[in-house]
Image: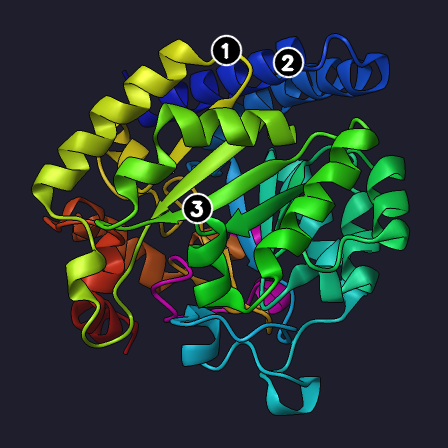
Amino acid sequence: MQLNEYMSGSIRNIMAKAYRNVLTNPREAKFAYKMQRLFEKSEKRRRQIRETDGIDVPPFLISSIATTCNLHCKGCYARSIGIANDSASDSKPTLSPEQWRTIFDEAASLGVNFSLLAGGEPMMRRDILEQAAEVKEMIFPIFTNGTLIGPNNISLLREHLNLVPVISIEGTASNTDDRRGQGVFKRALMSMEMLKSEQLFFGTSITVTTENLQHVTSRQFVEQLQSYGCKIVFYVEYVPIEPGTEHLAFGDEHVKQMETIMEELRTQYDDIIFLSFPGDEKELGGCLASGRGFFHIGPDGSAEPCPFSPFSDSNVAQIGVRGALQSPLFRKIRAAHALGWEHTGGCTLYEHREEIEQMAI
């Protein structure tokens, strides 16, 4: 099966499951049904662009909209490369809300279904969230630490169901607080309780390591998430950005183990959508970065292969999404079959960052 067909089929399955999971909530069910119909049109649009222009439009984007964060998590990748800081004056420049709106509007017109919003802490950019919310043909999962979801943001989420919070935790309360700060786990749970009481669709993101793999995929833990009201769980394999933490990254045996676990979870729990990154890429013939399945837009608009491969030769604010998909760097990576390079766990391109950096020169 072709990659485009597989991904489109996967999106249809995700939306169908999301619809089934919210049938008891008329407002969410109506929204999910509407998005199903819109995504069918988006799929046709991507196919038409591929046939007429020879451009493969990915169904996903990852957009780092925030350059500030209210936490100091251990091993934070965004801080390590200078994306996130304590104040905007210390951070890299970012696009205006209007520029982000232009990018999202174009992405929707091309048939992009989702843009994951990251940072920094994206909840600190209410102005950009408000612009994204108005792009009704797309869904925006907001990867957040969960500490800033209060009454004002709940009101925004209630009004715009295409903004979907995804709260990051590390598994247990002690693990979360050890990495993110004292009391962060309790605050994240309070946010989940608020979202559940409002009957809003939300998810959880968990960084998976060799040490917490068994716990965060256990029946007890998953059913705990279920009780919190989580409808989607993202498992993200740890990338060893800090020296001395290589033992936390997956090896081949862990990758195989995770594949088996994901199959079991998807069979056992009908009311939760489970996604694994980059684990699911094996079914898709390799890494999905560089426009193959997604690409990353940095805070300043730079078009990058993925968040863990921050190299760029073009800017989306200047040449648009369509132009970025045809950037020389992305073409080189795809032509070199770099996305199928051998790697252990985590991110393919991060593991081969020296080679990608040379391509960007």
Image-based side of 11 in relation to 264, left or right: right
Residue with the mark numbered 2: 21
Q: What stretch is highlighted in magenta?
A: 306-322
- Residue 124, picture quadrant: bottom right
Residue with the mark numbered 3: 171
Cα distance, mark 1 to mark 2? 8 Å
Specify the farthest residue to the bottom: 89
Dot 1 crowding, Cα within 10 Å, few <14, some 14–19, many 20+: some
At x 9%, y 38%, the residue is: 253
Q: Tag 3 or tag 2, which sits nearer the N-term?
A: 2
Dot 3 crowding, Cα within 10 Å, few <14, some 14–19, many 20+: many
List x then y, in percent, for residue 250.
18, 49
Observer-nearest of 223 and 355: 223
Q: Total number of numbered labels?
A: 3
List x then y, in percent, for residue 78.
47, 71
Contact? badges 2 and 3 (CB < 8 Å): no
User: What amino acid type should be assigned to the residue bearing mark 3?
Assistant: Gly
Observer-nearest of 105 and 269: 269
User: What amino acid type should be assigned to the residue bearing mark 1?
Assistant: Asp
Q: Tag 2 or tag 1, which sits nearer the N-term?
A: 2
* Secondary-structure class at tag 3: loop
* Secondary-structure class at tag 1: loop
